[in-house]
Image (tube, rainbow, N blue to C red):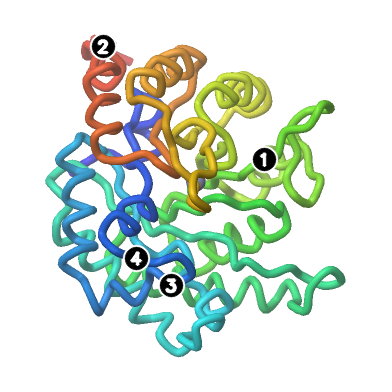
Amino acid sequence: MKPDIRDLARRRLVLYDGGMGTMLFAAGLVDGESPEPWNWEKPEVVSAIYRAYYEAGSDVVQTNTFGGTAIKLSEVNLENRVHDANYLAARALVQVRPEGRYAAGDVGPTGKFMQPMGEYTRDQFQATFEAQVAGLVEGGVDLISIETMYSLEEALCAVRAAKKVSNLPVIVGMTFDKNPRGFFTLMGETVPRCLKALADAGADIVGSNCSHGSPVFIELARLIRENTDLPVILQPNRGKPALENQVMVYRQTADEFVADLRVIAGLGVNLLGGCCGTTPEFIARLHDALHDRLNPAPREERPA
Ligand SMILES: [Zn+2]
Protein backbone atom coordinates (compact mmCIF):
# COMPACT_ATOMS: atom_id res chain seq x y z
CA MET A 1 0.00 0.00 0.00
CA LYS A 2 1.31 3.45 -0.85
CA PRO A 3 1.20 6.04 1.94
CA ASP A 4 -1.57 8.62 2.19
CA ILE A 5 -0.40 11.75 0.31
CA ARG A 6 -0.62 13.73 3.57
CA ASP A 7 1.91 11.42 5.23
CA LEU A 8 4.15 11.35 2.17
CA ALA A 9 4.19 15.16 2.01
CA ARG A 10 5.40 15.34 5.63
CA ARG A 11 8.10 12.75 4.97
CA ARG A 12 9.67 14.05 1.73
CA LEU A 13 9.20 16.52 -1.10
CA VAL A 14 6.39 15.43 -3.46
CA LEU A 15 6.63 16.18 -7.18
CA TYR A 16 3.42 17.36 -8.86
CA ASP A 17 2.80 17.67 -12.60
CA GLY A 18 3.14 20.65 -14.96
CA GLY A 19 0.71 22.40 -17.27
CA MET A 20 -2.22 20.46 -18.75
CA GLY A 21 -3.59 23.31 -20.91
CA THR A 22 -0.10 23.94 -22.26
CA MET A 23 0.09 20.34 -23.47
CA LEU A 24 -3.45 20.37 -24.90
CA PHE A 25 -2.75 23.55 -26.88
CA ALA A 26 0.42 21.93 -28.22
CA ALA A 27 -1.75 18.98 -29.30
CA GLY A 28 -4.16 21.21 -31.21
CA LEU A 29 -6.70 22.57 -28.74
CA VAL A 30 -7.73 26.00 -29.97
CA ASP A 31 -8.28 29.14 -27.91
CA GLY A 32 -11.81 29.22 -26.50
CA GLU A 33 -12.33 25.47 -26.98
CA SER A 34 -13.32 23.54 -23.86
CA PRO A 35 -10.70 20.86 -23.00
CA GLU A 36 -13.07 18.46 -21.20
CA PRO A 37 -14.72 16.98 -24.35
CA TRP A 38 -11.28 15.62 -25.25
CA ASN A 39 -11.86 13.11 -22.43
CA TRP A 40 -14.25 11.29 -24.79
CA GLU A 41 -13.31 12.72 -28.21
CA LYS A 42 -9.52 12.31 -27.97
CA PRO A 43 -8.87 10.12 -24.92
CA GLU A 44 -5.59 8.84 -26.40
CA VAL A 45 -4.18 12.40 -26.47
CA VAL A 46 -5.17 13.05 -22.86
CA SER A 47 -3.77 9.70 -21.69
CA ALA A 48 -0.47 10.39 -23.49
CA ILE A 49 -0.13 13.63 -21.50
CA TYR A 50 -0.85 11.83 -18.22
CA ARG A 51 1.73 9.18 -19.10
CA ALA A 52 4.34 11.80 -20.07
CA TYR A 53 4.08 13.42 -16.64
CA TYR A 54 4.37 10.13 -14.78
CA GLU A 55 7.37 9.21 -16.97
CA ALA A 56 8.94 12.61 -16.18
CA GLY A 57 8.78 11.64 -12.50
CA SER A 58 5.58 13.25 -11.21
CA ASP A 59 4.37 11.61 -8.01
CA VAL A 60 0.97 13.21 -8.61
CA VAL A 61 -0.77 13.87 -11.94
CA GLN A 62 -4.07 15.75 -12.23
CA THR A 63 -7.10 14.92 -14.38
CA ASN A 64 -8.11 16.99 -17.40
CA THR A 65 -11.11 18.40 -15.55
CA PHE A 66 -10.11 21.98 -14.70
CA GLY A 67 -13.41 23.26 -16.16
CA GLY A 68 -15.44 20.19 -15.19
CA THR A 69 -18.24 21.81 -13.19
CA ALA A 70 -21.73 22.12 -14.66
CA ILE A 71 -21.51 25.90 -14.29
CA LYS A 72 -18.31 26.08 -16.36
CA LEU A 73 -19.43 23.43 -18.88
CA SER A 74 -22.71 25.30 -19.43
CA GLU A 75 -20.69 27.92 -21.35
CA VAL A 76 -20.36 25.32 -24.12
CA ASN A 77 -23.76 23.69 -23.51
CA LEU A 78 -22.21 20.59 -21.96
CA GLU A 79 -23.67 20.91 -18.48
CA ASN A 80 -25.32 17.49 -18.93
CA ARG A 81 -21.91 15.83 -19.46
CA VAL A 82 -20.47 16.53 -15.99
CA HIS A 83 -20.36 12.90 -14.98
CA ASP A 84 -18.72 11.78 -18.25
CA ALA A 85 -16.16 14.57 -18.21
CA ASN A 86 -14.99 13.78 -14.70
CA TYR A 87 -15.48 10.03 -14.53
CA LEU A 88 -13.76 9.37 -17.89
CA ALA A 89 -10.83 11.66 -17.07
CA ALA A 90 -10.31 9.99 -13.69
CA ARG A 91 -10.61 6.46 -15.03
CA ALA A 92 -8.11 7.18 -17.83
CA LEU A 93 -5.63 8.66 -15.36
CA VAL A 94 -5.96 5.72 -12.97
CA GLN A 95 -5.36 3.32 -15.88
CA VAL A 96 -1.91 4.82 -16.62
CA ARG A 97 -0.95 5.54 -12.97
CA PRO A 98 2.20 3.57 -12.08
CA GLU A 99 2.44 1.64 -8.83
CA GLY A 100 3.09 3.95 -5.88
CA ARG A 101 2.02 7.15 -7.66
CA TYR A 102 -1.11 9.27 -7.24
CA ALA A 103 -4.05 10.32 -9.41
CA ALA A 104 -5.50 13.71 -8.43
CA GLY A 105 -8.99 14.81 -9.41
CA ASP A 106 -8.56 18.38 -10.63
CA VAL A 107 -11.16 21.02 -9.69
CA GLY A 108 -10.84 24.54 -11.11
CA PRO A 109 -12.93 27.68 -10.63
CA THR A 110 -16.40 28.04 -12.14
CA GLY A 111 -15.40 31.28 -13.85
CA LYS A 112 -18.50 32.91 -12.36
CA PHE A 113 -19.24 34.96 -9.25
CA MET A 114 -21.54 34.44 -6.31
CA GLN A 115 -24.22 36.93 -5.35
CA PRO A 116 -24.17 39.88 -4.99
CA MET A 117 -21.41 40.25 -7.62
CA GLY A 118 -22.80 37.43 -9.76
CA GLU A 119 -25.98 35.46 -10.23
CA TYR A 120 -25.11 32.25 -8.35
CA THR A 121 -25.83 31.34 -4.72
CA ARG A 122 -23.40 29.62 -2.39
CA ASP A 123 -25.60 26.49 -2.51
CA GLN A 124 -25.39 26.41 -6.30
CA PHE A 125 -21.60 26.65 -6.17
CA GLN A 126 -21.39 23.89 -3.59
CA ALA A 127 -23.75 21.65 -5.62
CA THR A 128 -21.77 22.14 -8.82
CA PHE A 129 -18.55 21.09 -7.05
CA GLU A 130 -20.24 18.11 -5.37
CA ALA A 131 -21.34 16.73 -8.75
CA GLN A 132 -17.84 17.16 -10.18
CA VAL A 133 -16.11 15.52 -7.23
CA ALA A 134 -18.58 12.61 -7.30
CA GLY A 135 -17.55 11.81 -10.89
CA LEU A 136 -13.85 12.05 -10.02
CA VAL A 137 -14.28 9.79 -7.00
CA GLU A 138 -16.20 7.21 -9.01
CA GLY A 139 -13.34 7.23 -11.52
CA GLY A 140 -10.95 6.22 -8.75
CA VAL A 141 -8.76 9.24 -7.93
CA ASP A 142 -6.56 9.19 -4.80
CA LEU A 143 -7.08 12.82 -3.83
CA ILE A 144 -8.89 16.00 -4.82
CA SER A 145 -6.79 18.88 -6.12
CA ILE A 146 -8.62 22.23 -6.10
CA GLU A 147 -6.58 24.87 -7.92
CA THR A 148 -6.33 28.41 -9.32
CA MET A 149 -8.99 29.67 -6.91
CA TYR A 150 -9.27 33.47 -7.04
CA SER A 151 -12.13 33.65 -4.53
CA LEU A 152 -11.81 32.30 -0.99
CA GLU A 153 -15.58 31.81 -0.73
CA GLU A 154 -15.60 29.72 -3.90
CA ALA A 155 -12.58 27.70 -2.72
CA LEU A 156 -14.40 27.00 0.56
CA CYS A 157 -17.44 25.73 -1.39
CA ALA A 158 -15.15 23.35 -3.28
CA VAL A 159 -13.46 22.12 -0.08
CA ARG A 160 -16.80 21.53 1.65
CA ALA A 161 -18.11 19.72 -1.43
CA ALA A 162 -15.05 17.46 -1.57
CA LYS A 163 -15.33 16.70 2.15
CA LYS A 164 -19.04 15.98 1.84
CA VAL A 165 -18.91 13.50 -1.04
CA SER A 166 -15.55 11.82 -0.31
CA ASN A 167 -13.06 10.86 2.38
CA LEU A 168 -10.12 11.75 0.13
CA PRO A 169 -7.32 14.19 1.01
CA VAL A 170 -8.08 17.69 -0.26
CA ILE A 171 -5.37 19.97 -1.66
CA VAL A 172 -6.10 23.64 -2.40
CA GLY A 173 -4.10 26.11 -4.47
CA MET A 174 -5.23 29.74 -4.36
CA THR A 175 -4.04 32.22 -6.96
CA PHE A 176 -2.90 35.66 -5.84
CA ASP A 177 -2.41 39.00 -7.53
CA LYS A 178 0.55 41.04 -6.35
CA ASN A 179 0.37 44.79 -5.80
CA PRO A 180 2.57 47.21 -3.81
CA ARG A 181 0.71 46.27 -0.61
CA GLY A 182 1.29 42.54 -1.04
CA PHE A 183 -0.53 39.45 -2.28
CA PHE A 184 -4.34 39.36 -2.55
CA THR A 185 -6.93 37.19 -4.28
CA LEU A 186 -9.02 38.84 -6.99
CA MET A 187 -11.66 39.28 -4.27
CA GLY A 188 -9.17 41.09 -2.01
CA GLU A 189 -8.51 38.31 0.52
CA THR A 190 -5.04 38.14 2.09
CA VAL A 191 -2.80 35.08 2.17
CA PRO A 192 -3.08 34.51 5.97
CA ARG A 193 -6.87 34.83 5.84
CA CYS A 194 -7.14 32.30 3.01
CA LEU A 195 -4.82 29.78 4.68
CA LYS A 196 -6.65 29.97 8.01
CA ALA A 197 -10.13 29.65 6.48
CA LEU A 198 -9.09 26.74 4.26
CA ALA A 199 -7.55 24.89 7.21
CA ASP A 200 -10.70 25.53 9.28
CA ALA A 201 -12.82 24.08 6.44
CA GLY A 202 -10.76 20.90 6.47
CA ALA A 203 -8.25 21.38 3.63
CA ASP A 204 -5.32 19.00 4.14
CA ILE A 205 -2.65 20.72 2.03
CA VAL A 206 -2.70 24.40 1.02
CA GLY A 207 -0.73 26.73 -1.21
CA SER A 208 -0.78 28.58 -4.50
CA ASN A 209 -0.52 28.08 -8.24
CA CYS A 210 -0.57 30.16 -11.41
CA SER A 211 -0.61 33.98 -11.95
CA HIS A 212 3.16 34.39 -11.39
CA GLY A 213 6.44 32.94 -12.50
CA SER A 214 8.97 31.23 -10.29
CA PRO A 215 10.81 34.40 -9.09
CA VAL A 216 7.63 35.82 -7.48
CA PHE A 217 6.86 32.41 -5.98
CA ILE A 218 10.05 32.59 -3.89
CA GLU A 219 8.49 35.53 -2.06
CA LEU A 220 5.09 33.82 -1.93
CA ALA A 221 6.65 30.61 -0.58
CA ARG A 222 8.04 32.45 2.47
CA LEU A 223 4.72 34.17 3.16
CA ILE A 224 2.68 30.96 2.86
CA ARG A 225 5.13 28.86 4.88
CA GLU A 226 5.02 31.43 7.72
CA ASN A 227 1.24 31.34 7.85
CA THR A 228 0.26 27.68 8.02
CA ASP A 229 1.22 24.46 9.78
CA LEU A 230 -0.26 22.34 6.97
CA PRO A 231 1.91 20.91 4.19
CA VAL A 232 2.36 23.54 1.44
CA ILE A 233 1.98 23.12 -2.33
CA LEU A 234 3.31 25.59 -4.93
CA GLN A 235 3.06 25.48 -8.73
CA PRO A 236 4.52 28.57 -10.44
CA ASN A 237 4.07 29.41 -14.09
CA ARG A 238 6.98 29.20 -16.50
CA GLY A 239 8.11 32.78 -15.85
CA LYS A 240 6.21 35.80 -17.06
CA PRO A 241 4.66 35.33 -20.52
CA ALA A 242 5.17 37.85 -23.30
CA LEU A 243 2.53 38.71 -25.88
CA GLU A 244 3.86 37.86 -29.34
CA ASN A 245 1.52 38.07 -32.35
CA GLN A 246 -1.48 38.05 -29.98
CA VAL A 247 -0.30 34.81 -28.35
CA MET A 248 1.09 34.46 -24.82
CA VAL A 249 4.55 32.95 -25.11
CA TYR A 250 6.54 31.54 -22.18
CA ARG A 251 10.26 32.05 -22.63
CA GLN A 252 11.74 31.13 -19.25
CA THR A 253 14.26 28.32 -19.63
CA ALA A 254 14.07 25.09 -17.68
CA ASP A 255 17.41 26.04 -16.05
CA GLU A 256 15.93 29.29 -14.69
CA PHE A 257 12.76 27.57 -13.52
CA VAL A 258 14.63 24.75 -11.81
CA ALA A 259 17.05 27.15 -10.08
CA ASP A 260 14.13 29.06 -8.51
CA LEU A 261 12.32 25.88 -7.48
CA ARG A 262 15.44 24.62 -5.73
CA VAL A 263 15.33 27.80 -3.62
CA ILE A 264 11.61 27.28 -2.96
CA ALA A 265 12.18 23.65 -1.94
CA GLY A 266 14.70 24.93 0.62
CA LEU A 267 12.03 27.13 2.22
CA GLY A 268 10.10 24.18 3.59
CA VAL A 269 7.57 23.71 0.79
CA ASN A 270 6.26 20.13 0.64
CA LEU A 271 4.79 19.67 -2.85
CA LEU A 272 6.17 21.33 -6.00
CA GLY A 273 5.19 21.35 -9.65
CA GLY A 274 4.56 23.75 -12.50
CA CYS A 275 1.57 25.61 -13.90
CA CYS A 276 1.04 27.46 -17.20
CA GLY A 277 3.82 26.95 -19.74
CA THR A 278 5.51 24.07 -17.96
CA THR A 279 5.83 20.69 -19.68
CA PRO A 280 7.03 17.15 -18.87
CA GLU A 281 10.54 18.36 -19.77
CA PHE A 282 10.39 20.88 -16.91
CA ILE A 283 9.15 18.20 -14.51
CA ALA A 284 11.91 15.80 -15.60
CA ARG A 285 14.48 18.53 -14.94
CA LEU A 286 12.97 19.17 -11.51
CA HIS A 287 13.02 15.45 -10.81
CA ASP A 288 16.79 15.38 -11.43
CA ALA A 289 17.58 18.64 -9.64
CA LEU A 290 15.54 17.78 -6.52
CA HIS A 291 16.68 14.16 -6.33
CA ASP A 292 17.94 14.37 -2.74
CA ARG A 293 14.70 15.90 -1.46
CA LEU A 294 12.57 13.42 -3.41
CA ASN A 295 14.63 10.48 -2.15
CA PRO A 296 15.84 11.35 1.37
CA ALA A 297 17.87 8.76 3.25
CA PRO A 298 15.46 6.67 5.34
CA ARG A 299 15.37 7.74 8.96
CA GLU A 300 16.02 5.12 11.59
CA GLU A 301 12.87 3.86 13.23
CA ARG A 302 13.12 4.46 16.95
CA PRO A 303 11.32 2.07 19.26
CA ALA A 304 8.49 3.81 21.05
ZN1 LIG B 1 -1.44 28.48 -14.57
**On residue 176, which mark appears?**
1
Please tell me whether mark 1 or mark 4 is closer to you in this view. 4
Between tags 2 and 1, which lies in front?
A: 1
Residue drawn at x 46%, y 13% is: 263
The amino acid type, in three-letter code, at marker 1 is Phe
Residue position marked by numbered label 4 in the rendering: 29
Q: Position of residue 58 (x, y in %)?
A: 26, 38
**Of the numbered discs in the image, which one, if any, rests on residue 34?**
3
> Which amino acid is tagged 4?
Leu
Q: Is mark 3 within 8 Å of ligand 1?
A: no
Q: Kindly report which numbered mark, 3 or 1, lies closer to the viewer in this rendering.
A: 3
Residue at figure coordinates x 26%, y 38% from the top left: 59
- Cα distance between the residues tagged 2 and 1: 37 Å
- What is the distance, in whole Å, between disc 4 and disc 2 at their CAs? 46 Å
Count of labels in the image: 4
- Which residue is drawn at the image coordinates 37% and 46% (left, top)? 19
Give the quadrant of residue 296: top left
Crowding around mark 2 (Cα neighbors within 10 Å: few <14, some 14 to 19, many 20+) is few
Give the CA distance from mark 3 to mark 2: 46 Å
**Disc 1 and disc 4: Cα gap in Å?**
27 Å
Mark 4 and mark 1 in contact (Cβ < 8 Å)? no
